[in-house]
Image (cartoon, grey):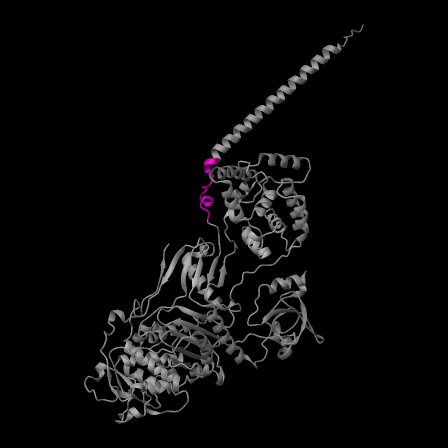
Amino acid sequence: MYHFTLFNASNGKIYYSAMIKKIITIFLGLFLGLALFAIGLLAIAVLVTYPKLPSLDTVQHYQPRMPLTIYSSDGKLIGLYGEERRAFTKIEDFPKVLKDAVLAAEDKRFYNHWGVDVIGVGRAVISNMTGGVRSGASTITQQVARNFFLTNEQTFTRKFNEALLAYKIEQSLTKDQILELYFNQIYLGQRAYGFAAASQIYFNKPVQKLTLAEATILAGLPKAPSTFNPIVNPERAKLRQEYILNNMVEEKMITPGERTQALNENLHYERYVQQIDQSALYVAEMVRQELYEKYGESAYTQGFKVYTTVNTENQKVATEALRRTLRGFDRGSSYRGAEHYIDLDKSENEEEDINDYLSKLYAVDGMVPAVVTSAGKKGVQVQLPNGKRTNINLGFAARALNNTKMGDAQIRRGAVIRLSKLKNGGWTVVQEPLLQGALVSLEAKTGAIRALVGGYDFHSKSFNRATQAQRQPGSTFKPFIYSAALAKGMTAATVINDAPLSLPGHGTGGRPWQPKNADGTYSGFITLRQALTKSKNMVSIRILMSIGIPYAQQYIQRFGFNAADHPAGLSMSLGTGLATPLQVAEGYAVFANGGYKVSSFVIDKIYDSNNNLRAQMKPLVAGETAPQVIDPRNAYIMYKMMQDVVRRGTATRANALGRSDIAGKTGTTNDNKDAWFVGFNPEIVTAVYIGFDKPTSMGRAGYGGTIALPVWVSYMRFALKGTPSKGMAVPSGLVNRGGEYFLKEQQSTNPKLALDNRASGPITSQRRPSGNASKSRTPGNTSNSGQETVVEPINRPTPENSGRGGNNNLDALF
């Protein structure tokens, strides 16, 4: 028998209803428990993490990384160093249109949240979960936290720390302070950091002059600087701009009509390149090295503004004068070949790769870099830096066309060459000269460098020949030996035998040394003045034999030379040691300023990024703080003797200036490998050096008076323009007889003595001058001829102030 249990519908509903309620209650309990547990964990995490967050000193005392900028004395930019291009700007100086655009793009509720936009986070989560457009929800404050303290890694820990830091920043800074940090710190592509720099780099205009269309383009960059770069990806940049403009309309920042107008505006993008004066690159590099030695890498990030002593107009004239001579010497040389070679066959985008390569090169002296794209019997085509392609005239370089014997130097597809534009608009091949040189010009009284050129082209080789090239100074060194002779008791009228010498054991390998005069002629007994005027080698050697090599080595240190660079030998009198053009110029400054040792310097003032003066040069000044290293009377006599070198000696081309206050000395080394001229007046000293980097004969054209002196004349004509001739004042303690100057104490034993002839030994042989010897010598000053002028002596230099001299003091205020 079967038993049936009847189902009661009403009871079933009650049962299921109770079960559902129980399940919901359990789930709610679990959810609430988990929520409370999560909140507890979050609270613990906050309590543990918050105290460990980094200090906010970086943002509270914001010091933006700003490049090192170097300026000439007349305010022209001559150097810029540092990876980040930034122009710090106060938030109130940014235009409202840019602020609105950035807020519309990055953080519409910036002024209403506490660092994290909860509404934005919720919307982003829902959008991401439902398959909508994926979006982030980082606020501007969070981006500031990430840029200053965190990385871009996509982890929960980083996002958590970012949120806490954002809250901490909001508690410490005002909204405008946060916005100022963001507007100046954010990276916007093209090495631009901050919107002020980006405005210059993309639109070549101050940020205050941005239009709505331009502002919205820049506002689109923080999200992805490369993706939305308007120069590289104009279509994507336009889409991003439209999104921002729509947000601005939605937020009632602009009207729909303004949006349409901005979208239709035709924008012009310019690759902004900060204009750097190319004539002073060697000077800028000197400053960079000095600051790097003192501050290390921070020199490129602290925003130092360095003002130098050089004048850009002087620099341009000096650079062109040197280049003109070097070009002229190279004219007629055969073509040496292409500068470089790039394999275009491996290039996926030939035109773009060539443009990138050429963008790193510079046109120098009108010589434009180009890459050969095809080379054959039908002609040679090149691509220019502006991207255009054109056929060229090979001219003297024709022999290099596909000449395999020249290797990578041949002109073929991929060759990098230099071109010069012809009058008819065409292009022809040119090349930079191999011959090099340097010019350095100093203020005689302080050592301030007014112009310095270290070579033909800084970009091809940054080696600074003015400060780094140690070369034989040749006859430009003789005045220092003559000065030592005067200090030993000789005079400009001392008679010395200009006759051949043969010195056993002084030559190479112990062989006899038989030096010669440069012109191969000998004058017999002549005065020191005449010998220096004609640059007589035999006289210089005999002077050194008389005063002694040890004394001479000690004496030249007064002018700043290192004795070790001038080995102990009689050839030292002919300038066979080593010196840089700057060292030689400093040495001549002693003669020009009356006997004081000044030190050259190129940094005048240093300002910080807030334009506060941080350091200022306090140079040693002749007649004031600089040490007196030779008797002023010695300096004056040397000045008068070197005036004769210009008037009637080896440097007569300097008379082209038409001035009466110029003195100087030429110099040429063996086989014409180095050519010099150092000339000065009491205000300016300028040294010019010409020679190959690898010492090589310059041939018959390579004399100091023929190749170095013209450079000096071209520069000094400009440097002295508008200044009257003003010779050196006669110092106390000199006697003038017959147009020659003598120290007063040298005449005290025999005031009627016409010429002092104290020199003895091998320099005078057995002959003494006749009583009328003064008639045959070259007078130093004929204005007082026949009269005796006696003036009171001054204190002579003491051992304490006769050394090499001190150093300038860059008075650092920090």
Tag count: 0
Q: Residue at x 34, y 91 (%)?
A: 499
Image height of 135 relative to 25, above or below = below
Front one among 541 and 320: 320
Q: Residue at x 48, y 73 (%)?
A: 317
Q: Quadrant of the N terminus?
A: top right
Front one among 713 and 250: 250
Q: Quadrant of the C terminus?
A: bottom left
Residue 6 horizontal/vertical position (percent): 77, 8
Q: Is residue 171 visible?
A: yes
Q: Is residue 585 magenta?
A: no
Residue 381 horizontal/vertical position (percent): 68, 71
Image height of 15 relative to 520, above or below = above
Q: Which residues are magenta?
A: 50-62
Image height of 620 relative to 483, above or below = above
Residue 665 horizontal/vertical position (percent): 39, 81
Residue positioned most to the right: 1
Left/right placement of residue 793 relative to residue 320 reads: left
Q: Is residue 548 visible?
A: no
Q: Quadrant of residue 787?
A: bottom left
Left/right placement of residue 652 relative to residue 378 reads: left
Front one among 545 and 213: 213
Q: Is residue 59 magenta?
A: yes
Left/right placement of residue 742 relative to residue 707 reads: left
Q: Quadrant of residue 766?
A: bottom left
Residue 225 horizontal/vertical position (percent): 60, 50
Image height of 65 relative to 380, above or below = above
